C-alpha cells in the first residue's frame, strides 16, 4: 500500500513537472528580463504537497531541465526563483497545518492584514523615495522608448501608484468577504494562507530578488558593465514595471491557486500523510 501511494505521489510530481513546461509556453515577455507568466502556480502546488525541501529540489531540477532544453544563459539568481516559489509554498503549508486546528482564524486574518499593509506601505514608500531622489528627478523628464512605444517616466509612476491602490482595495475587499461570509473555518484559513503565499512570492521572489537579479544579470552578460538603461534610468527602470505586473497579477494568482489547492486537499488526503511532515525536515 505504501509503495502504491508513493507511486501515486510520483505521478502527481510528474504531472506538475509537465504543467511547468505547459505554463512556460504561455509566458509573455514584457522586457528582456521580465515576463508575465503563471509558472509559480505548479511550483507552489508542488511545494504545498511535498514540503519545502522536496519543493526546492523540484524547482532546481525543473529549472535545470528547462535550461538544458532551451539553451539560454544560466544565471544563479534567476535559477533560485523557481526553487524559492516551491520552498515558500512548503513553509506556508506548514504554518497552515499548525493553524488548521486553531479555534478561530482571527489571528491569521490580522497577520495577513499586517503583511498586506506592509507590502503596500513599503512599496509606495520606495516610489516616493525615488520621487525625492536627485537621480530620479534628473530622469523624470525622460521617456522609456522602444520601437513601438514611448512612455514618460512620470506616467509610468502614476500608473504604478494607481495599480497599488486598486490592488490594495480589491485585496482588502476580498479579505473582508472571506472574514464575513466564510463560516467554514478550514476554507477561510485555506483562502487566507493562499493569499499569504501569493503575496510572499510577489514580494520576496518577483519584486526583491527579481529586480536585483535583472540588474546583476545584465551586468554579468556585459562583462561587469551595467546596461545603458540602468545608467540612464537607474533601478527605476527594472523595479517599477515588475511592481506594476505583480500588483495587477496577484488577484489572478490567488484565483488560480485557491481552487487548485482545494482540489489537491480533497483528493490527496488518503496519501498526503506520507509527506505531511516533510516541510519540517
Image (spheres, helix red, strand yellow):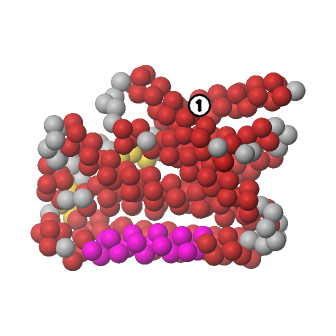
Towards the viewer: 94 or 234: 94
Quarter holding the C terminus is top right
Q: Is residue 156 visible?
A: yes
Q: Position of residue 31 (x, y in %)?
A: 30, 46
Side (left or right) of 239 relative to 120 = left
Q: Percent x, y for residue 136? A: 18, 69
Seen in the image, is 209 located left or right of residue 145? right
Q: Quadrant of residue 129?
A: bottom left
Secondary element under disc 1, as helix, strand or loop, is helix
- Residue 257 position within the rendered picture, expressed as x and y whole percent measured from the top left: 63, 51
Residue 132 falls in image quadrant: bottom left
Range of residues picked out in magenta: 112-129
The residue at the far right in this view is: 1
Residue 118 located within the stretch drawn in magenta:
yes
Question: Who's the residue at 24% across and 53% down the image?
Answer: 149
Q: Is residue 28 visible?
A: no
Residue with the most extreme front position:
281
Tell me if residue 2 comes above or below residue 191 in the rendering: above
Q: Nearer the viewer, residue 227 or 220?
A: 220
Q: Is residue 241 left or right of residue 116?
A: left
Magenta-drawn stretch, dominant element (helix, strand or loop): helix
Q: Is residue 223 left or right of residue 202?
A: left
Q: Which residue is mark 1?
A: 17
Q: Quadrant of the N terminus?
A: top right
Amino acid at each position: 500500500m505504501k509503495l502504491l501511494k508513493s507511486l501515486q505521489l510520483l505521478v502527481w510530481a510528474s504531472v506538475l513537472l509537465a504543467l511547468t513546461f505547459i505554463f512556460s509556453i504561455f509566458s509573455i515577455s514584457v522586457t528582456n528580463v521580465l515576463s508575465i507568466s503563471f509558472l509559480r502556480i505548479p511550483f507552489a502546488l508542488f511545494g504545498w504537497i511535498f514540503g519545502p525541501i522536496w519543493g526546492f529540489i523540484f524547482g532546481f531540477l525543473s529549472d535545470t531541465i528547462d535550461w538544458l532544453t532551451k539553451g539560454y544563459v544560466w544565471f544563479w539568481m534567476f535559477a533560485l526563483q523557481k526553487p524559492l516559489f516551491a520552498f515558500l509554498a512548503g513553509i506556508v503549508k506548514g504554518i497552515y497545518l499548525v493553524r488548521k486546528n486553531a479555534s478561530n482564524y482571527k489571528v491569521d486574518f490580522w497577520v495577513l492584514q499586517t503583511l498586506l499593509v506592509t507590502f503596500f506601505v513599503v512599496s509606495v514608500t520606495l516610489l516616493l523615495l525615488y520621487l525625492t531622489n536627485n537621480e530620479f528627478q534628473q530622469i523624470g523628464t525622460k521617456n522609456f522608448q522602444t520601437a513601438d512605444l514611448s512612455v514618460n517616466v512620470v506616467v509610468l509612476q502614476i500608473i504604478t501608484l494607481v495599480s497599488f491602490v486598486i490592488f490594495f482595495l480589491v485585496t482588502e475587499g476580498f479579505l473582508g468577504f472571506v472574514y464575513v461570509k466564510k463560516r467554514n473555518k478550514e476554507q477561510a484559513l485555506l483562502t487566507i494562507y493562499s493569499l499569504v503565499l501569493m503575496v510572499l512570492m510577489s514580494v520576496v521572489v518577483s519584486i526583491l530578488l527579481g529586480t536585483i537579479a535583472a540588474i546583476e544579470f545584465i551586468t554579468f552578460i556585459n562583462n561587469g558593465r551595467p546596461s545603458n538603461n540602468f545608467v540612464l534610468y537607474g533601478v527605476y527602470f527594472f523595479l517599477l514595471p515588475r511592481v506594476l505586473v505583480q500588483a495587477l497579477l496577484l488577484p489572478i494568482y490567488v484565483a488560480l491557486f485557491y481552487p487548485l489547492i482545494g482540489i489537491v486537499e480533497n483528493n490527496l488526503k488518503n496519501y498526503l500523510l506520507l509527506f505531511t511532515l516533510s516541510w519540517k525536515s
